[in-house]
Image: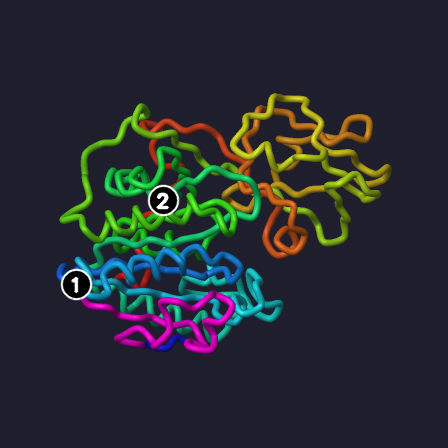
Amino acid sequence: MIKRLNKLPDGFLNCSAEDLYTLIPESTLISLDGEKKEPLFLSVLLHGNEPTGLVVAQNILSKYQEDGLPRSILLFIGNVKAASKGLRRLDDQPDYNRIWLEGHIENESAIHLDIAELLHEMARRSLFASIDIHNNTGINPHYGCVNKLDPTFLNLARLFSRTVIYFIQPGGVQSKAFSHLCPSVTLECGKVGDEFGIQLATHFVDEVINLESIAQNNVTDQDIDLFHTLAVIKIPQSVSFSFDGSDADIEFIQGIESLNFEEIPPDTSIAKIRTGITAPILVLNEDGEDITGQLFTIKENKLVNLKTLMPAMLTLEEHIIRQDCLCYVMERYEIGMGEKASDDEKPVWTV
């Protein structure tokens, strides 16, 4: 399912995400030679409704079309079929940013097998860095995400933004897989069409491919604002919800997405809960354990938080919430605290 190319298809540089399937009908890896031979792995459109990565790649490749790339690039283009429909993924597809793993996979598909083969191949390459580019569906700042607190990872992320998120779950994400191979980062570039996010990401990729090396000096808490993802909040399929005050099992306060990256003090009411609904949300920690009761309770038909919480990626889009989640919950994190989990065992495909 993963097509291989050694040059850009004609018309690629001006093609929209929706029309890309006319040039590239499937997931594709395009190998492009540059002056520095250790390649940058650049992944875009893992979610079909997040086109900023494609635009950034087009900006970079257009800039160096005549003079040649300063560094080789392995451009991975993900869910082209979903992009043609403007969707995160199609209903019969897995999430293309949850398939970067090997081993026993529930509902394994052909793309899982192809990704496993690709990971084996990349493990034999000397990669310079990996960048995965995404958009948010809610109001969020521009920020980078890392899966290791190694100085090279943090130095790479801070080139994009002072705001950095460290996470180890969910599993199967591209940046986590590549963290075993090279410094890797995920860029969150704001909503679709955010021109400033596009400019930031374009400048970042341009800077990275011109680097001789990534800084290895220690990063301090004064250098970046570091956060750690504590948990994910999901809404059970049987529970209805609304954001505009209309009747539902959960009626969230209007404007709730403005709470992204805001610390919410304890006992804040974030939703009205219909009488009889005892489990309106499900909160899972990094180990997949239900910790809903540790963070939330229902008081007088209001959903309130028990601790100071900071949400991220809060979205109002029902389709995204049903396919993925309502949001993540974060805490401020000090670099000296060390990594939360021992996740450094090298997977089989790196051996």
Q: Residue at x 32, y 48 (%)?
A: 344
Judge whether residue 49 is colored magenta.
no
- At mark 1, the secondary structure is loop
214 sits left or right of 322 in the view: left
Judge whether residue 9 is colored magenta.
yes
Q: Which residue matches tag 1? A: 67
How many other residues sit within 10 Å of disc 2, few (<14), some (14-19) or many (≥20)? some
Where are the magenta residues, as a range?
5-34
Residue 145 lies, in percent from the top left, at 39, 43
Residue 210 lies, in percent from the top left, at 18, 51
Q: Which residue matches tag 2? A: 200
Please state the total of marks drawn on the protein image.
2
**Labelled disc at residue 250:** none
Corner quadrant of residue 101:
bottom left
Name the N-terminal-most of marks 1 and 2: 1
Q: Residue at x 31, y 23 (%)?
A: 222
How many other residues sit within 10 Å of disc 1, few (<14), some (14-19) or many (≥20)? few
Q: Of residues 78 and 194, which is closer to you in this image?
A: 194
Q: Amino acid at mark 2?
A: Leu
In the image, residue 258 above or below residue 185:
above
In the image, residue 264 above or below residue 30:
above
Tell me the quadrant of the picture where the N terminus can be found.
bottom left
Q: Of residues 96 and 26, which is closer to you in this image?
A: 26
Q: Residue furthest right?
A: 275
Q: Residue at x 24, y 65 (%)?
A: 65
Residue 10 lies, in percent from the top left, at 34, 77
